[in-house]
Image (cartoon, rainbow, N blue to C red):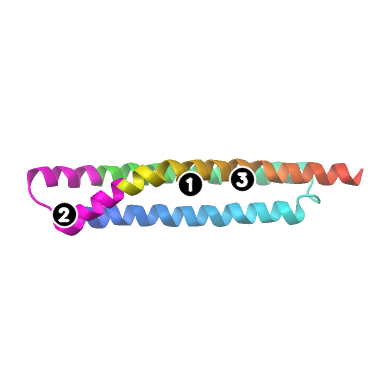
């Protein structure tokens, strides 16, 4: 593939990952809002179904993110091989350097924050349901 095609595909993979994260954050926010406003009125079966659905959706998003990340890393590797053999444009070199910095700095921070969000969101609805049934007795 040409340099242009590889940079375009790498950029599209990153855009797709960003889109997936926006979708996941929207669903996570809706799940937490549902828990906050209606958690005390939901029964245990409904909470279990919603929690399993949210976890299943989150795991599928994670699988798609890993697939896109593996593809992006492959395109990155191809571009670096082209850079060793020949020359890349200054924009592509800057893109690769910037991607490396972002991956090194924000990758672990982003992963930890997503994990904490997932854990908090997952346990918030059962907690609100438990506290609602406990308060009503």
Residue 129 in which image quadrant = top right
SS majority, magenta:
helix
User: From the viewer's perspective, is 92 left or right of 38?
Assistant: left
Q: Nearer the N terminus, badge 2 or badge 1? A: 2
Say if 121 sits above or below 94 in the image. above
- What distance separates the C-alpha of mark 2 from that of mark 1? 29 Å
| Mark in the foreground, 2 or 1 | 2
User: From the viewer's perspective, is 90 left or right of 23?
Assistant: left
Q: Nearer the N terminus, badge 3 or badge 1? A: 3
Q: Nearer the viewer, residue 23 or 95?
A: 95
Asked if disc 3 and disc 1 are in contact, CB closer than 8 Å, the reply is no
Q: Secondary structure at mark 1?
A: helix
Residue extent of the magenta highlight: 76-100
| Mark in the foreground, 3 or 1 | 1
Q: In the rendering, at what x and y percent does residue 90 appear? A: 16, 57
Q: Which mark is residue 3?
A: 2
- What distance separates the C-alpha of mark 2 from that of mark 3? 41 Å
Q: In the rendering, at what x and y percent does residue 99 appear? A: 30, 50
User: Does the magenta portion include 81?
Assistant: yes
User: From the viewer's perspective, is 111 left or right of 51?
Assistant: left
Say if 7 sits above or below 78 in the image. below
- The residue tagged 1 is 61
Q: Residues within 10 Å of mark 3 (few under 14, many from 20)?
A: few
User: Does the magenta portion include 53?
Assistant: no
Residue drawn at x 31%, y 47% is 101
Residue farthest to the right, as pictured: 137
Q: Residues within 10 Å of mark 1 (few under 14, many from 20)?
A: some
Residue drawn at x 52%, y 45% is 114
Q: Secondary structure at mark 3?
A: helix
Q: Secondary structure at mark 2?
A: helix
């Amino acid at each position: 593939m040409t340099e242009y095609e590889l940079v375009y595909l790498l950029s599209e993979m990153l855009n797709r990952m960003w889109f997936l994260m926006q979708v996941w954050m929207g669903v996570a926010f809706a799940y937490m809002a549902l828990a906050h406003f209606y958690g005390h009125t939901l029964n245990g079966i409904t909470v279990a179904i919603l929690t399993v659905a949210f976890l299943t959706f989150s795991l599928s998003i994670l699988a798609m993110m890993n697939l896109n990340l593996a593809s992006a890393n492959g395109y990155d590797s191809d571009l670096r091989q082209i850079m060793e053999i020949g020359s890349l444009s200054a924009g592509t070199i800057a893109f690769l350097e910037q991607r490396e910095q972002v991956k090194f700095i924000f990758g672990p921070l982003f992963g930890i924050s997503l994990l904490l969000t997932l854990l908090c969101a997952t346990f918030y609805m059962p907690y609100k349901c438990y506290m609602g049934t406990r308060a009503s007795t």
